[in-house]
Amino acid sequence: MGKIVFLSNRLPTTVKRNKEGALVYEESIGGLSTGLKSFHQEADSIWIGWPGILEEDLTGEEKQEIKKTLRDNYQCIPVFLSKREVDEYYHGCSNRTIWPLFHYFTGKTEYDPSNWETYCEVNRKYFKTAEEYLDSEDVIWVHDYHLFLVPELLREGYPQLKIGFFLHIPFPSFEVFRLLIWRKEILKGLLGANLIGFHTYDYMWHFLTCVRRLLGCEDVLDKIIYNGRYVHVNAFPMGIDYERFFNYQIEPGVAENSEFSLENGQGMKTILSVDRLDYSKGIPQRLKAFETLLKRYPEYKEKVTFYLIVAPSRVEVKAYHQLLKEIRELVSEINGRFGTMDWMPVWFFFRPFTQEMLINYYRQADILLVTPLRDGMNLVAKEYIAARNDYRGMVVISETAGAANELGEAIIVNPNDYRHTAAGIKAALEMPEEEQEARNLIIHQRLKSYNVDYWGEEFLRALRWTGTYALEAGLPRHIKEDIEEIQKAWCQAKKRLLLLDYDGTLVDFTNVPEEAKPDLELRKLLNEAAEDLKNTVVIISGRERHNLLRWLGDIHLHLVASHGLWIRNPGQHEEWNMTARQEKGWKNVVLPILGTYTDQIPGSFIEDKVYSLAWHYRQCDPVIIEAKLPEIRETLNRILQSTNLGIQEGKKVLEVKDKTVNKGQAATYFLNRDQYDFILALGDDHTDEHMFTMLPKKAYTVKVGLGKTAARYRTDTWLSARMILKKMIQS
Ligand code: ADQ
């Protein structure tokens, strides 16, 4: 088993310069590094990320020194970033575009194309750094919204690698996500992973909806089918290092120092909140809720003190300056209005505290008030409960924090509803100790079982398992496993039959069918295959005759059009043989029905073929299609019953045609013409299944993409299907 490679924007260790100018190494703060740190220290792993110091501020020698110290002492690999990169990729695109949008602050979201370009550039830089340290057995775990494009870059370079991605912030609903200019790039970037994890199922459903509606990919339960691979998605609610918080021994110097004591006891209750400075954390709203408490329940004046601990963060972003100003104003307003000589209602601390100090405060506070407007998870709430090894205290948390899903026994409030929040605080303040204990005990059990190790191990276990899924799902063998044997059979063969579907097999799908014409590479490939006298090469397609003739008529190929209705031998130019007599009269009945649906569903269109009607819905909203398709099928089936017509379903198209005509019959026609000692058939959709089932068992039948099939083998995409042909020809 290889090592684990963590990739995240920041390293868990920050490099700074002290007053004397020497380089110092400190622990980074923030949910991600706090959560993963213990996991990283124990596992055979390396962590790749930015050490937090600008590249311009370092000499070449210092960079080497940092590299060595981080590697030797912290299992870390630095990615050095310049001031421009930090400004545009981190403060710009990550924190002024993605962060606000993903937390539903659409009004704060900036769209700057040059920041996006730098974001792409820096993602490539992380990928390049990772490349230097990768072994084929390694498992890569990419973290968070700064590195959305890394999974795709890794996948392109290393198709076999196990790549996981975890998103620490919410994934917004489709209506919000679609506002982003680079929404498709982000989805495609993520889909390079084998496994994508979210804190909650809600975020996962949002992601699946976005993938379906923006990329048109199908999903089955917890898997997306993308580029011939399964991409797994799941919810992995992040836990904390429970035992550490529960058992933490606070140094006597800290515990006994009155400066570090909250002013509780003697009739005074204390409320604590701990956050990074961020508008998503709802700090002004929280202060207003506290003010509402004092207004609505004046009996709490001089009886409750609010300790507001805020860690500076992203101070370079303007929105954060305004926020800090707003918080300061609100704090002084409340203190000015309600304070007395003996009592200051709000104590505001704007600096980071060590974990020990936080635990010290957690253990003293009667209530933890965490009311983010949006939060991926919120670890502070979990830390507070775990640190309370006396099982006392109460959490008041907003429903918009991911953690609220797991803290059902806490008091859950709407952060925008100050009265509701104030009533929640009051209920917590007045809750009898036995009830606090009973509620907290349940949460303790949960936090103990679902701790950060469990979270990390579950994610990695799921990630390692992803590759074996294909076999367990009953899919056929991947052709790459037997390719050499097949090449050998090709070389020994005297007469070969190649049956090749066109769309989705030799070329990619396009929005307009007319645009899927063969490129030079494909024409060359088919030419080479057809020139070999041992080969009978058949393009077997649902396309109309004129398309095939115009695009491929000059190559020495057998052409089968309209799913087997027409066959043309090489050199016969426009002489097509019809394999079954056909009627057209029925089109007068079916065309108006399809016309009605085409009018109702934007993006759909009818392809009026000579003896069939194809209804295409590739460009339609998948949600509308999902709702409408059963009705369309039923309407058509009712009309078509007791005729020889049927619906043939392809990829994002359904076609009404003579059901007795199919690719299986066309394949039989060729089988009957000669004795072949090598048969290769490639196809990607339902229509090709007729062909696969009619061919002898020894034929090499290959399904392009995933899904149920009668084929012996599978391959990933039309690109890999072309590769197979190339390999055969070159053998
Ligand atoms: P954050 O937004 O950083 O994390 P949070 O989950 O609360 O939010 O984690 C904060 C961590 O930093 C905690 O471990 C806490 O102890 C520490 N911390 C917070 N304020 C501090 C302060 N004033 N001084 C010192 N330490 C402080 C992001 C997402 C969250 C998600 C985490 C983990 O925004 O929603 O829960 O990642 O996935």
Image: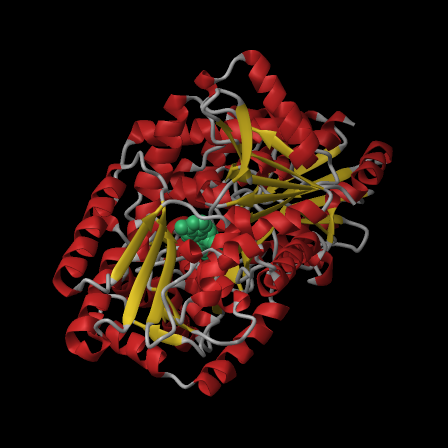
Indicate left or right for 105 with 245 as reference: left
Q: Is residue 96 above or below residue 266?
A: above
Q: Nearer the viewer, residue 546 or 258?
A: 258
Image coords of residue 610 (percent x, y): 40, 51
Q: Is residue 181 visible?
A: no
Q: What residue do we see at 48% from left, 66% from top? A: 363
Q: Is residue 170 above or below residue 130?
A: below
For the N terminus, which image quadrant? top right
Q: Residue furthest top?
A: 60
Which quadrant of the view contains residue 23? top right
Image coords of residue 681 (percent x, y): 68, 46
Q: Nearer the viewer, residue 315 or 8?
A: 315
Q: Nearer the viewer, residue 401 or 211?
A: 401
For the C terminus, which image quadrant? top right
Q: What residue do we see at 48% from left, 35% from top? A: 549
Image coords of residue 658 (percent x, y): 49, 63
Q: What residue do we see at 37% from left, 69% from top? A: 264
